[in-house]
Image: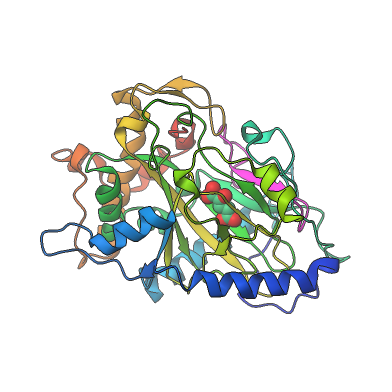
Amino acid sequence: MALQAHKSDVATNYGDEQEAMATYRRAGEERAMTLGNRGPIRFNPDGSLAKEILDAYWRCGFYVFTGVLGKDELADIEADVANILERAPVTEGATVDIHGRPAIAVDCKAPTLFWARPLSDPFGGTDLANGRHPARMFEPRAAADAPEKIVYLILGSLQFSDACLRVYGHPDLLGVAAAIHGPDFTPFNEALFIKQPGLGSSVAWHQDGVTHWDSPDFDQGSHGFNFMAQLYGSTSANGLWLVPGTHKLGKQDIKARVASAGSDRLPDAVPMLCAPGDVGISNRQTLHGSFANTSPDTRVTVNFGFHRRSSVLGIKAGGVHNAVATYDEARIHERARLIAYAIDARQQRFPHEKRFVYQPFVGQEDNYRWNAAARAGLKDYNLLDLSI
Ligand SMILES: O=C(O)CCC(=O)C(=O)O
């Protein structure tokens, strides 16, 4: 499977819903631009994150940081994603890639490659992932010559891409994580979402998080956030949509929202609009989803999340991304070594950039130098994802 050119002239559209979708997208784009939740990452002289950014993030449940990744870094990511897709099994269940070589990830124990029929909704209305995607999305018809199945999601993605690992170690993004979750923030998981033109499947409306909804100390930050770095940008047609403010409201009745809308076009949702190199941040409790990509534009999202330590330490969790376990300090530290490696990998590639100081690993940096042995040690690292 190859990464399609950034722009393609796909001949798909949204079928019977084409007109309604076009109107919905235009209205959503207008609403998105009035929210006041986008701009460059800005820190105060004392290193704290600009208050307007924090306020807007907590008000809306998401924010778009503009211009975070430069051209060189985007080129690195593009090359890695193309390489991953070229090394993917030629079809689901195959053990070789398109060139007959042993395919990537077939020997992984942890979940990695997720396949779906082109333009389908693989999760909506199923019990998968704790049944958290209760309503099915509209499934437009794919072109007759489309492949039977495509890879649309890759978990444990840092073991396959140094470029994604380096994004994970970005000093300003880690600074944002520390501002939101405190300096001892912890990892969640990492993924690549790949929405190819005329193929990319939908992600049905959902809220992430399984553990804290009924907790007595539940609050708007209980389940952490995801960064969403955009290789080619994201549009109202291929990008994530979110319902602002829902991260504060507890578990939403998604079926009822869809029923009252009369379709999967939730009326108060807005798209996360990004240029190449922009990085969205989305509170995992915010109601969100994305539509099948019938547009000519590819979306590749380098997705990675963080938690505050108190949301994971001592918590019995799992079942969505890996085995059920109670998370102790040792488990968190072992999983957080990815942050230490990422910081070092980034420093090697961008030596003039300020190196982020990750508080839980201060003094241990020499044990986490990025090299071939460290890379080999990342195999199946996502068995330890902190999945709350
Ligand atoms: O990027 C997408 O389309 C879906 C992302 C998502 O659902 C998530 O990160 O939880």
Where is residue 47 shown, x and y percent of the image?
A: 15, 58
The way the protein has been coloured in the rendering is rainbow
Is 377 rendered above or below residue 49?
A: above
Residue range highlighted in magenta:
101-121
Outermost residue to the left: 46
- Residue at image position (38%, 71%) is 66
Q: Is residue 362 left or right of residue 198?
A: left
Q: Nearer the viewer, residue 57 or 277?
A: 57
Whether residue 302 is in magenta: the answer is: no
Is residue 352 visible to us here? yes
Give the percent coordinates (x, y) of residue 139: 79, 56
Classify the position of the N terminus by image quarter. bottom right
Q: Quadrant of residue 330?
A: top left
* Any part of residue 101 in sight: no
Assign the magenta stretch its main secondary structure. loop
| 363 in relation to 258, above or below | above
Q: From the viewer's perspective, is 185 left or right of 86? A: left
**Residue 10 picture location, percent across and down:** 76, 75
> Residue at position x 65%, y 51% from top?
203
Q: Nearer the viewer, residue 259 or 42?
A: 259
Which residue is the extreme one toward the right?
A: 144
The residue under the point 44% across, 31% down is 384
Q: Quadrant of residue 124?
A: top right
Instruction: Say if the magenta span includes residue 103.
Output: yes
Pick whichever, 68 or 213, lies toward us.
Answer: 213
> How many numbered circles does the render carry?
0
- In depth, the one of 369 and 28 nearer the eye is 28
Where is residue 51 shown, x and y percent of the image? 24, 60
Q: Quadrant of residue 189?
A: top left
